[in-house]
Image (cartoon, rainbow, N blue to C red):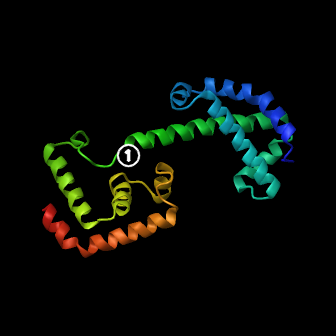
């Protein structure tokens, strides 16, 4: 919390082995280690601790983080926090990986539908959507919202760097919906 670099180096040296131990003992350690090397997990868990200290020092701590200040009066409390950092980091990375594997854009994947008829119907529907929505970003947002069932914040997590913020997603959605509503008769005709 005091921004002492020598103390930070000593802390990293002293507790990195604990973080490695917790990583390897985690129930999903094998899956996690297939995504990234162990050192990345250690570094990011320590980064979360640093961010906590930075927020405490600058008075921008979240309400749920305020309980950790009391726990940090003991070594056991600090270690418990570090262990929670590692645990949440592992689960976060696994969730992101799962989302990345689940959300392809609908190209030619008949395996995801129950029958060939359903597949052709969905493919034709998305073709109609693509002809109405010429903006690829609007197409992408509509697909993620309505085909994949994601919420705007989940889209930001799944597609880092693709959209600036939630407001951009809302704007693209609003524009796309307006355009689709204006062409509702075409959609009904083409998909019937």
Query: Dot 1 corresponds to which residue?
Result: 103
Q: Does 82 appear above or below 186?
A: above
Question: Which quadrant of the figure contains the C terminus?
Answer: bottom left
Front residue (pair 184, 12): 12
Specify whether 107 is left or right of 47.
left
Q: Residue furthest bottom?
A: 182
In terms of image quadrants, where is residue 131?
bottom left
Residue at image point 51% right, 61% down: 164
Residue at image point 72% right, 38% down: 46
Front residue (pair 157, 74): 157
Percent coordinates x, y for residue 8 in the rendering:
82, 38
Q: Does 63 appear above or below 83?
A: below
Residue at image point 75% right, 44% down: 50
Q: Secondary structure at mark 1?
A: loop
In terms of image quadrants, where is residue 72?
top right
Percent coordinates x, y for residue 78 in the rendering:
79, 37
Residue at image point 40% right, 39% down: 101
Percent coordinates x, y for residue 84 in the rendering:
68, 37
Count of numbered marks:
1
Q: Residues within 10 Å of mark 1 (few under 14, many from 20)?
A: some
Specify whether 49 is left or right of 138.
right
Q: Does 12 appear above or below 147?
A: above
In terms of image quadrants, where is residue 23?
top right
Front residue (pair 152, 37): 37
């Amino acid at each position: 919390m005091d921004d002492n670099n020598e103390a930070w180096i000593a802390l990293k040296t002293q507790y990195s082995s604990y973080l490695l131990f917790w990583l390897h003992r985690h129930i999903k350690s094998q899956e996690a280690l297939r995504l990234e090397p162990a050192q990345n997990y250690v570094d990011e868990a320590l980064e979360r601790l640093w961010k906590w200290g930075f927020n405490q020092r600058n008075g921008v701590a979240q309400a749920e983080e305020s309980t950790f200040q009391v726990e940090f009066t003991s070594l056991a409390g600090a270690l418990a926090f570090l262990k929670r950092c590692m645990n949440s980091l592992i689960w976060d990375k696994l969730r992101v990986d799962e989302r990345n594997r689940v959300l392809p854009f609908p190209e030619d994947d008949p395996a995801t539908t129950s029958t060939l008829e359903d597949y052709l119907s969905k493919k034709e529907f998305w073709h109609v959507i693509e002809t109405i929505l010429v903006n690829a970003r609007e197409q992408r947002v509509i697909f993620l919202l309505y085909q994949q069932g994601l919420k705007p914040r989940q889209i930001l997590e799944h597609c880092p760097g693709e959209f600036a913020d939630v407001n951009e997603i809302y704007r693209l959605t609003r524009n796309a919906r307006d355009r689709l509503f204006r062409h509702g008769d075409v959609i009904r005709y083409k998909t019937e």
